[in-house]
Image (spheres, grey):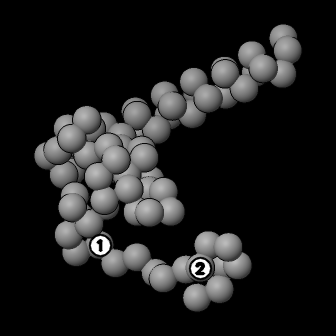
Amino acid sequence: MNKGSMSVSRAAVLEGLLHTCSSGIIAIDRQTNIILFNEAAERLTQLPRGDAMSRPIQSVIPDVSLPSVHLSSGER
Protein backbone atom coordinates (compact mmCIF):
# COMPACT_ATOMS: atom_id res chain seq x y z
CA MET A 1 0.00 0.00 0.00
CA ASN A 2 1.46 3.36 -0.96
CA LYS A 3 1.39 6.45 1.24
CA GLY A 4 -1.34 8.13 -0.85
CA SER A 5 -3.80 5.28 -0.40
CA MET A 6 -3.07 5.17 3.35
CA SER A 7 -4.01 8.86 3.58
CA VAL A 8 -7.30 8.24 1.81
CA SER A 9 -8.00 5.32 4.09
CA ARG A 10 -7.26 7.37 7.22
CA ALA A 11 -9.42 10.21 5.92
CA ALA A 12 -12.28 7.80 5.30
CA VAL A 13 -11.96 6.37 8.81
CA LEU A 14 -11.87 9.85 10.34
CA GLU A 15 -14.88 10.92 8.31
CA GLY A 16 -16.78 7.84 9.45
CA LEU A 17 -15.90 8.45 13.10
CA LEU A 18 -16.92 12.10 13.00
CA HIS A 19 -20.26 11.38 11.41
CA THR A 20 -21.18 8.41 13.61
CA CYS A 21 -20.03 9.96 16.89
CA SER A 22 -22.88 10.56 19.33
CA SER A 23 -21.44 13.97 20.29
CA GLY A 24 -22.15 17.02 18.19
CA ILE A 25 -18.97 18.15 16.45
CA ILE A 26 -18.70 21.48 14.68
CA ALA A 27 -15.41 22.80 13.29
CA ILE A 28 -14.81 26.32 12.05
CA ASP A 29 -12.17 28.02 9.95
CA ARG A 30 -10.24 31.20 10.78
CA GLN A 31 -13.19 33.34 9.71
CA THR A 32 -15.48 31.33 12.07
CA ASN A 33 -17.35 29.74 9.15
CA ILE A 34 -18.50 26.16 9.68
CA ILE A 35 -16.37 23.62 7.82
CA LEU A 36 -17.49 20.44 9.59
CA PHE A 37 -20.93 19.62 10.98
CA ASN A 38 -21.63 16.03 11.95
CA GLU A 39 -24.97 14.22 12.23
CA ALA A 40 -25.16 14.69 16.00
CA ALA A 41 -24.72 18.45 15.49
CA GLU A 42 -27.65 18.30 13.06
CA ARG A 43 -29.80 16.66 15.74
CA LEU A 44 -28.72 19.09 18.46
CA THR A 45 -29.28 22.22 16.38
CA GLN A 46 -32.17 20.81 14.31
CA LEU A 47 -30.40 22.23 11.27
CA PRO A 48 -29.45 20.14 8.22
CA ARG A 49 -25.72 19.98 7.49
CA GLY A 50 -26.20 21.57 4.08
CA ASP A 51 -27.82 24.62 5.69
CA ALA A 52 -25.05 24.95 8.29
CA MET A 53 -21.95 24.51 6.15
CA SER A 54 -20.04 27.71 5.30
CA ARG A 55 -22.24 29.82 7.59
CA PRO A 56 -20.73 31.81 10.44
CA ILE A 57 -20.92 29.80 13.67
CA GLN A 58 -22.77 32.71 15.33
CA SER A 59 -25.66 32.28 12.90
CA VAL A 60 -26.08 28.66 14.01
CA ILE A 61 -25.24 29.06 17.70
CA PRO A 62 -25.93 32.74 18.48
CA ASP A 63 -24.60 32.71 22.04
CA VAL A 64 -21.29 31.05 21.19
CA SER A 65 -18.30 32.70 22.82
CA LEU A 66 -15.01 32.31 20.99
CA PRO A 67 -11.69 33.51 22.39
CA SER A 68 -9.89 36.22 20.51
CA VAL A 69 -6.69 34.63 19.23
CA HIS A 70 -4.15 36.03 16.81
CA LEU A 71 -3.67 32.97 14.65
CA SER A 72 -0.28 33.93 13.24
CA SER A 73 1.38 34.13 16.67
CA GLY A 74 -1.06 32.40 19.00
CA GLU A 75 -1.04 35.48 21.26
CA ARG A 76 -4.28 36.80 22.71
Looking at the image, residue 42 lies above or below residue 69 = above
Q: Residue at x 31, y 59 (%)?
A: 56
The residue nearer to you, when weighing 53 against 8, is: 53
Q: What is the C-alpha distance between the residues marked 1 and 2?
A: 18 Å
Q: Is residue 26 visible?
A: no
Quadrant of the drawing holding the N terminus: top right
Which residue lies under the disc numbered 1?
64
Q: Residue at x 40, y 76 (%)?
A: 66
Residue 16 rendering spot, x and y as whole percentages: 49, 28
Q: Secondary structure at mark 2?
A: loop
Identified by mark 1, the residue type is Val
Residue 15 rendering spot, x and y as whole percentages: 51, 31
Is 10 on the left-hand or right-hand side of 57? right
Which comes sooner in the sequence, label 1 or label 2?
1
The residue nearer to you, when weighing 23 against 50, is: 50
Identified by mark 2, the residue type is His
The residue nearer to you, when weighing 16 against 7, is: 7
Count numbered badges in the picture: 2
Q: Residue at x 21, y 61 (%)?
A: 59
Which residue lies under the disc numbered 2?
70
